[in-house]
Amino acid sequence: MDTQSLKAFIAVAEQKSFSAAAESLYLTQSAVSKRIKQLEEQLSTTLFDRHNRTISLTEAGEALLPRAQHILDLVSDTELELENISGDISGSLTLATSHHIGLHRLPPVLRKFVHAHPNVDLDLQFMGSERAYQAVRLRQVDLALTTLEQTPKSDIAAIPLWQDDMVCVCAANHRLAGIPQISLQDLSSEPAILPEPDTITYQLINHVFAAEGLSLKAPMPTNYLETIKMLVSVGMGWSVLPSSMVNDDALTVINWPGTSLRRQLGAVFLKHRTQSNAATALMDLLHASADD
């Protein structure tokens, strides 16, 4: 089995379309069809059931899919290990990050990195925490800088780098600002401007309310903390933000009625995936930055 045929097979399985797979691989549809045919002939089995307008994996195809991905991952890791022997810090490095980390934590690190390692082709992608973890598992990114899960999964290495102390805030003229002792019930009855429900930050906040049998009223979720800050400052609701972002008179800090909220920020990557010299160099800079 050659790797190009396996890549074509995985692409067709994921896209459920020969034409879409061809587009994703920058090949012609006939080239993809030829590779699948060669693979089926080599294995003496049919991998796809061709329907009228759709395709689906056969039982043999279902069995091959995880093994094909494992083979490609093994080849990729082996090639990377051999490249690392040279000690060169070059090639591509795909990094996922949240907007908050990308704007407030990462710039001085990236400035040093691109200056020290000009031969690295850095691809920076902004995404929420849940999507970042998924991208790491699917090997779509090498590293992700994001909010860390409270209970890390067994396949993920999580390296704490920074801690965000979170505070509850509202606009200075908001109704909540005039209540001396805020309760979770008070907050539950007011609109909350929060990150999207699939983010770790939202889940951290929601857990506090769910434990008391209360629900959050979050009409317009957004993962941009700067946007959340603006919406809160004009009186559209309350939120929970890193204390470092509360630095003007437009926001009032509310006494949070629950236990202190903290979120851990850091780097995540697959435990058993070989990391490139470029990824290792970036992690060294991140550790140094976190220690400052």
Image: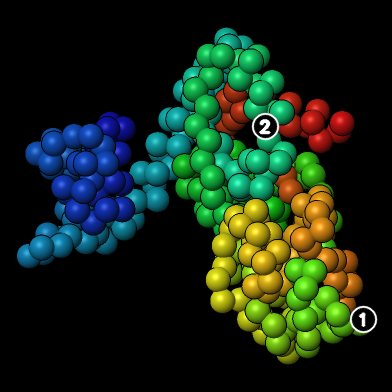
Q: Residue at x 18, y 34 (%)?
A: 27
The image quarter in which residue 41 lies: top left
Q: Residue at x 65, y 79 (%)?
A: 191
Residue 86 seen: yes
The disc label shown at residue 107, or none: 2
Observer-nearest residue: 247 or 32? 247
State the quadrant of the N terminus.
Answer: top left
The image quarter in which residue 201 lies: bottom right
Q: Residue at x 17, y 60 (%)?
A: 55
Secondary structure under the numbered disc 1 in the rendered image:
loop
Q: CA distance from mark 1 to mark 2?
A: 39 Å
The image quarter in which residue 197 lies: bottom right
Which of discs 1 and 2 lies nearer the camera? The answer is 1
Task: Using residue 117 as the reference point, say whether residue 48 is left or right of it.
Answer: left
The three-letter code of the residue at mark 2 reads Pro
Observer-nearest residue: 264 or 100? 100
Secondary structure under the numbered disc 2 in the rendered image:
helix
Residue 144: image x %, image y %?
Answer: 61, 42
Q: Are marks 1 and 2 in contact (CB under 8 Å)?
A: no
Write down the residue under mark 1.
Answer: 180
